[in-house]
Image: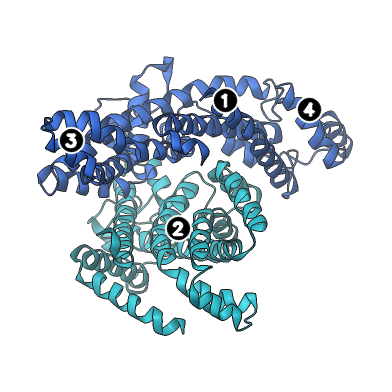
Chain colours: A cyan, B blue
Amino acid sequence: MPEASAAGPWRSAAERLAASAAARAALALLCGLVLFALLAPALSPWRPDGLDWQHLAASPGAAGGHWLGTDRLGRDLLVRSAAGLRLSLAVSVLASLVSLAIGVSYGAIAGFAGPRTDGAMMRFVDVLYAMPYLFIVIILTSLFPRGSLTVLFVALGAVGWLTTARLVRGQARALRHREFILAARTLGLAPAALLVRHAVPNLLGPVVAYASLAVPQMILFEGFLSFLGLGVQEPNASLGNLIAQGAQEMSSAPWMLIVPSGLLVLLILSLNLLGDALRDALDPREH
Amino acid sequence: MLSYALRRTLGLLPTLLIIITLSFLILRLAPGGPFDQEQTLPPAVRANLEHLYGFDQPLPEQYLRYLGALARLDFGSSLKERDFTVTELIRQGLPVSAALGALAIVLALLAGLPAGIGAALGRGGATDHLTTGATALALALPSVVTGPLLALIFGLTLHWLPVGGYQGGSLRYLVLPALTLALPVAAALARLMRASLLEVLRTPYVRAARARGLSSAAVLWRHALPAALTPVVSYLGPAIAFVVTGSLVVESVFGLPGTGRYLVQGAIDRDYPLVMGMIVVYAVLTLLLNLAVDVIHAALEPGARHA
């Protein structure tokens, strides 16, 4: 029963996680950011794409009730940043899920396949590793209709699965000869059922730890692409294109750069700290 | 050692061929073409243009022709910058990008390694906590944030360094871009160096060296550091890949005339020869630099040669 054997390590990992002060602080920060992203646009009188002609490029705290100022078109920066935060989070979580789905299935199949299939599949991963893969994302996003969020997270996810595949494949090879897998095989379980019911649940620990560090990577890439003008397009806001606009205006309206930059840094910081704590909690041998 | 290096260099060719093939397919099978953006061309002109560049041939033939030209180191001419061949464009941009990347790696090593060593030696002390905090912050600062912020602080506010551009190619113009690029690499190097040195300091042979009465400096320099450097050297491969791709944003933030803009603008314009040329050059560069890292690795640790 994989559930019974998995409950123990998962629960103790959760206890170790709760015991870490850094993890609690990071989690609180992350919850705060998510709440801000979800609630600010709903609670504020301003809309992310609403124009306020009376207050163009207003500085923070100036008149008009724009706490963090406005951009050149009079759009409220607080609401716009919250909307950008929400979009960046959504794209990166979806991209991470896409890359996890590809990576876990590819790695598990390679790990449980015969040596020849495994060799060929992993050789292909090696070759893709040598590709300047952000270049491929850039090419993909520039070739398809720009601003399409589907293209953005599929492109990000499709190139981010390589490390997951390697990790899962290594785990799978180690699992292959364990007694419970042999037992399931002897009992005549079909390969697909073996993978889904027994292999994957036992592979998940390191994968979850890696995935928690993959989300901030995806946020970075999204920022990177939107900054280059290849990701999220106006009038939609993401942290990346808000920073790009802020960088254009930084001599006259530095707050336009500082507000989204600060949010991006806090978001990545909280995710990184949480990911580190999660990795330590799931792999207690290191400490 | 030499035969190892030679064998590995030849082993790069199939990898390179696969990269070229995949990129060619992605680029050519995607919708759109190089003559779409301008005002609609008369059909006859368009047909003539396509004939001139060979786009009217079947795709497999274009592919073979491209490979043949590549074998003679001919990248073709740019479709947008009509007066330049791809080779000329790359020759203009590459020195700037290469100088930026090299400076960033050197800065990262100079800052990251001493910080990591200091943190490991003073484990649990003030240096250690400072390094851990600083690296956590640095790893959360993406270049899209650091670049504009550094330009805002040191360029626009303090006027110490230029905000952007590359007039005359003076080193002053590369300082802020290289710092931007080096920061996360330095942080990753410092963390890796710290973890690796801590692990080596716990091994029996380091304790044995101490027990023989060697000074702590001798233990560090002669025994611990050489062993601790191995994982750091392996990290240089990914670090180089990071710097190569990271330079795209940094060049765009600081308006440096490097090769990054060719890739982005070339892809938007469907300038096939330019984008392919850029991918080939960057792939060869990344592969060779990674190979150099592997060779150094093998020289440090002979067992790795057969891995």
* Spot occupied by residue B297 in the image (x, y as percentages of width and height): 43, 33
CA distance for labels 4 and 1? 28 Å
Q: Which mark is residue B3?
A: 1
Q: Residue at x 56, y 41 (%)?
A: A130
Residue type, mark 2 in image: Ala
Question: Nearest the camera: A105 or B173?
Answer: A105
Element on which disc 3 rests: helix
For marks 4 and 3, give the CA distance: 59 Å
Please tell me in which quadrant of the rendered image residue B55 appears: top right
Q: Are marks 4 and 3 in contact (CB under 8 Å)?
A: no
- Residue A237's tag is 2
Q: Marks 1/3: CA distance?
A: 35 Å
Q: Which residue is mark 3?
A: B209
Q: Chain of mark 1?
A: B
Q: Is residue B292 left or right of residue A255?
A: right
Q: Earlier in the sequence, mark 1 or mark 3?
A: 1
| Left or right, B46 with reference to A270 | right
Q: Which residue is mark 4?
A: B68
Disc 4 and disc 1 on one polypeptide chain: yes
Real-space Cα separation, disc 2 to disc 4, in angstroms: 45 Å
Secondary structure category for the residue under label 2: loop
Query: Residues at badges 4 and 1 in contact (C-beta under 8 Å)?
Result: no
* Labels 2 and 3 positioned on one and the same chain: no
- Indicate whether B3 appears above or below A194: above
Amino acid under label 1? Ser
Residue A32 image point, x, y percent = 27, 68
Q: Indicate the chain on which mark 2 is placed.
A: A
Which element type, helix, strand or loop, lies under badge 4?
helix
